[in-house]
């Protein structure tokens, strides 16, 4: 059998799992090493989502134009230096997203909302968590929501490191999260959600995990 895990020390996701594991089994007393490594770090997912949100409507240019936009955001203190450092290696990926049909639809919308925080009390039965009317607090932050033909469309950015073959499985993994997002938007606004999209920035791929006109889990 395999005695030791085969790991890539240059993989941020793998190393994050190692540091967290050491905390959980008390191999890192008082979480000292974990805090030293991550206290001032910005998660790649959060930084990339912020960059994509800031650039989506205003820009459709290339990597150089995005770099200039990022510098302006730094000067205006919309981005922090540590966030910019996380974003720079992915400017090409974000530029690809800005040339996608999904980004075109966002730019065409007259109502685009970013980083929308929500809190909603719903029965556990309605959320599919238990056969109970007990209320559950549903909270989250929507990366981006835009209006299209009188309905809302939800977009959630993901920065997972995954192969092309793993994307379908990842999309299924996030389907429950997107169902909760759809339910929250429909309940809070009283308007239907036409579709929910996951955009995997590293792979430059989008999945429709919900669509009123289709079965969902379609690559777009």
Image: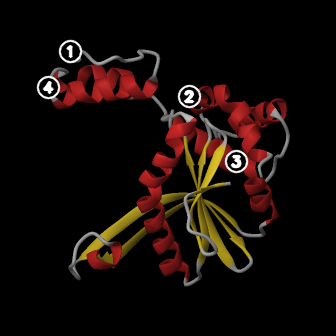
- The residue located at (34%, 17%) in the rendering is 6
Tell me whether the residue at label 3 lies in contact with that at label 2, contact meaning CB atoms closer than 8 angstroms: no
Q: Position of residue 134 (x, y in %)?
A: 21, 78
Q: Which residue is more in the foreground, 104 or 70?
A: 104
Q: In this view, does 91 lie to the left or right of 217?
A: right
Q: Earlier in the sequence, mark 1 or mark 3?
A: 1
Q: Distance between the residues labelled 2 and 1?
A: 37 Å
The circle drawn on residue 82 is: 2
User: In the picture, which quadrant includes the N terminus?
Assistant: top left
- Residue 30 visible in the current orientation: yes
The circle drawn on residue 54 is: 3
What secondary structure is found at the residue carrying circle 1? loop
- The residue located at (47%, 46%) in the rendering is 170
User: In the picture, which quadrant includes the C terminus?
Assistant: bottom right
Closer to the eye: label 1 or 3 = 1
Q: Where is residue 32 in the image (x, y as percent from the top left)?
A: 25, 21
Q: Is residue 74 above or below residue 110?
A: above
Q: Distance between the residues labelled 4 and 1?
A: 21 Å
Callout 3: 10 Å neighbours few (<14), some, many (20+)? some
The answer to which quarter of the image holds residue 205 is top right
């Amino acid at each position: 059998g395999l005695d030791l895990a085969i790991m890539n020390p240059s993989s941020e996701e793998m190393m994050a799992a190692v540091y967290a594991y050491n905390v959980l089994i008390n191999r890192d007393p008082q979480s000292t090493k974990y805090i030293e490594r991550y206290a001032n770090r910005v998660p790649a997912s959060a930084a990339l989502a912020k960059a994509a949100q800031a650039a989506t409507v205003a820009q459709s240019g290339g990597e150089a134009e995005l770099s200039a936009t990022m510098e302006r955001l730094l000067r205006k203190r919309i981005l922090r230096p540590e966030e910019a450092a996380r974003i720079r290696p992915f400017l090409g990926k974000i530029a690809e997203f800005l040339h996608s049909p999904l980004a075109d639809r966002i730019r065409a919308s007259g109502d685009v909302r970013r980083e929308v925080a929500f809190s909603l009390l719903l029965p556990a039965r309605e959320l599919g968590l238990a056969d109970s009317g007990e209320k559950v607090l549903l909270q989250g932050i929507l990366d981006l929501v835009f209006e299209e033909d009188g309905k809302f469309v939800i977009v959630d950015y993901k920065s997972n490191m995954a192969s092309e073959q793993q994307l379908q499985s990842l999309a299924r993994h996030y389907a429950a999260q997107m169902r909760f997002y759809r339910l929250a938007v429909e309940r809070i606004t009283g308007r239907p959600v036409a579709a929910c999209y996951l955009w995997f920035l590293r792979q430059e791929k989008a999945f429709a995990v919900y669509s009123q006109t289709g079965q969902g889990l379609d690559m777009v």
